[in-house]
Amino acid sequence: MPSAKTIADLKTRFLKPALTSHYEVNIPLGSLPEGIKSIGKGLSSLDQDNLNLSCMETSLPGSSLATFEVKNDYTGVTERLAHRRMYDDRIDFTFLVDAEKYFAIRIFEKWMRYIAGEDIDREDGETITTRGVNYHYRVRYPGTGSDTTGYRCTDGLTITKFEKDMRNSLTYEFIGAYPISISSMPVSYEASSLLKCTVSMSYLRYVMTELINPETTPTIKVKAAQADKENTQELPEAQKNESKVGNTAGEGTAFVETDSATGFRDVDDGPLLKADGTPAYDSSGNVQ
């Protein structure tokens, strides 16, 4: 039977969806081959941060299972059994191009030239330039995990999806990634717009790391109340006398519980007596 749901249940479960604008991309320039990192004066940590922050659009990867049909195990039943996990053939990254270095364009162009072997020195000593009539190239070997001359980024290229509270996250790490295309970037004399560079990268597979933290009960720290300014007013007369209980009848008199601020004593104790046992009188002649 269908179960009844209250409005409070729906708000708790469905009114806190994940947002697409909270993510982080990491392109590990330090893990790339040395031939790619030699751009101008080299790469710096600032170039690394700027490239990661300039990625304005990407996508979380997907995968599927390849199946084959089995028809002969059960009469009239066709089964589809999985035999391979299939990953997407590429993933796209869109970068904002900075006006100082055009860094996003230059780094991926350099990476693709390195893959194509356009910078390789020929063993026969022949000088081949990209503008030469006899220009040709030989694509590099992709390399393995221990081979630093390959063109693939073995690990470290990640996309992290998180939320504003930073409690939960999903990190996709791409194994063996490298760029396979750079999309054309139109320019015109019409109204100016942002120049964007879209790079498609191939990879072998991805590994997802989950970080899910349970929601904790917030603890509210009570801040002690403090006065806006120091109190400089004089205390009332009764407060100056500091109300306390004790023998205030004077030295040499019997002990009687009396309030020093008000002068009142417990009437059940009877009249105040002197040391010789006679009643004590005040200035009006009344028995105290």
Image (cartoon, helix red, strand yellow):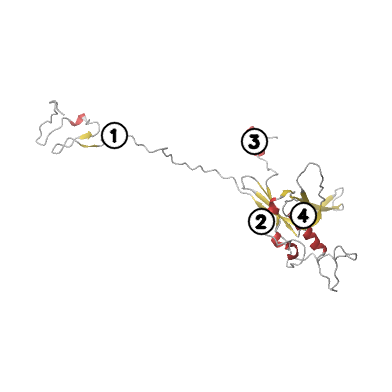
* Residue shown at 66% from the left, 35% from the top: 10
Report the mark closest to the observer, 3 or 2: 2
- Count of numbered circles on the image: 4
Q: Is residue 276 above or below residue 52?
A: above
Residue placed most toward the observer, 185 or 223? 185
Residue type marked 1: Gln
Q: What is the x, y in percent for residue 91?
A: 77, 52
State the image quarter where residue 244 is shown. Answer: top left
- Pick the quarter of the image with the N terminus: top right
- The residue that mark 3 highlights is 11
Q: Which tag, 1 or 2, sits closer to the chain's start?
A: 2
Residue type marked 3: Lys
Q: Which tag, 1 or 4, sits closer to the chain's start?
A: 4
Q: Are marks 3 and 2 in contact (CB under 8 Å)?
A: no
Q: Are marks 3 and 1 in contact (CB under 8 Å)?
A: no
Element assignment for label 1: helix
Q: Which tag, 3 or 2, sits closer to the chain's start?
A: 3
- The residue that mark 1 highlights is 239
- The residue that mark 4 highlights is 105
Q: Which mark is residue 46?
A: 2
Element assignment for label 3: helix
Residue placed most toward the observer, 80 or 47? 47
Q: Are marks 4 and 3 in contact (CB under 8 Å)?
A: no
**Visible in this render: residue 66?**
yes
Q: What is the x, y in percent for residue 17?
A: 67, 41
